[in-house]
Image (spheres, rainbow, N blue to C red):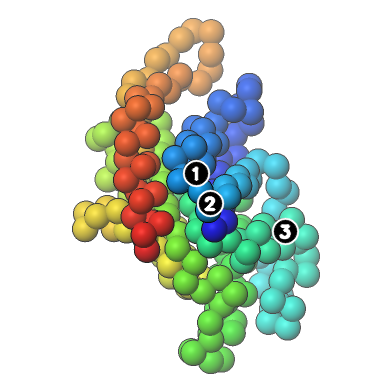
Amino acid sequence: MKVLCISASNIIHKAFDDSTSFKLCKLILECLPKENYIGEIVDLRTYKLQPCIGCGQCFETHRCVHDKEFNCIYENIISSNIIFIVSPHYAPIPAKLCMLLEKMEQITFLHWAKDTNYKSEVYGISTGIISHGGGSDWALPSYKAMVNDTIANALDTIQLKLIPYSQEWNTGISIPVASVVNSNNDIFPQQEYDWSKIKDIIHKYISKVIQS
Ligand SMILES: Cc1cc2nc3c(=O)[nH]c(=O)nc-3n(C[C@H](O)[C@H](O)[C@H](O)COP(=O)(O)O)c2cc1C
């Protein structure tokens, strides 16, 4: 079983590993059962994606004729059994994730509009959504509304199978910061996390996604 984790942050941190999205992806791979699962991370910082211009040529090609980097990620998604999308809250979602979702949407939608029985190449692939941002527990309902629900809406058109966490968290999970430290030496506040608590919730969500 191939598990693909998409790290949606665009931020070039001082150290590559400083991205919380990237760390969460690494944690997902660590938490996978040791046997029968191969994990891979797609870090969107390393891709130069272009927005969809609505040229309609993907109706014939099923790929984007303008964007080889998108096609590379799309092939990777098609060949996966399970996807995790890990996204920070931006405004509301990072631009490259938006470009990825809008192209997958367009490829599927153009065919579905002509034939509502159309099944996309990614039809039914189990997908988990994990959001986070610069806020603690109080911020999680707004991350759900702006990040998880936005991505979930796109997955519906693309025909990826969203796996809920619970009745309340029906579009995936959201991860809080434990504390935020402001220092005069850095423009950005330092976000600190309770990684053992996060590992527990990630474990539970992975089990639900795998069982699906
Ligand atoms: C353009 C931009 C907009 C952001 N907007 C918000 C926001 O509205 N609310 C919030 O809690 N965090 C916001 N953040 C902070 C990020 O969500 C947070 O720092 C996150 O940990 C970044 O993910 P990364 O560590 O994987 O790069 C924003 C960050 C950027 C770059």
Q: Which residue is mark 1?
A: 34
Residue 26 point in image, percent of width and height:
53, 37
Q: Quadrant of the C terminus?
A: bottom left
- Above or below, 171 against 16 in this view is below
* C-alpha gap between disc 2 and disc 3: 21 Å
Q: Secondary structure at mark 2?
A: loop
* Along the viewing direction, whichever of 175 and 50 lies nearer the viewer: 175
Three-letter code, disc 1: Lys
Q: Residue at x 30, y 53 (%)?
A: 165
Q: Quadrant of the N terminus?
A: bottom right
Q: Residue at x 31, y 30 (%)?
A: 197
Q: Earlier in the sequence, mark 2 or mark 3?
A: 2
Three-letter code, disc 3: Cys
* Along the viewing direction, whichever of 91 and 208 lies nearer the viewer: 208
Residue 56 point in image, percent of width and height:
69, 78
Judge left or right: residue 164 versus residue 158. Answer: left
Pointers 1 and 3 in contact (C-beta within 8 Å): no
Q: Which residue is mark 2?
A: 37
Residue 152 point in image, percent of width and height:
41, 61
Nearer to us: label 1 or label 3 = 1
Q: Which residue is mark 3?
A: 72
- Which residue appears farthest toward the front when viewing the image? 35
* C-alpha gap between disc 1 and disc 3: 27 Å
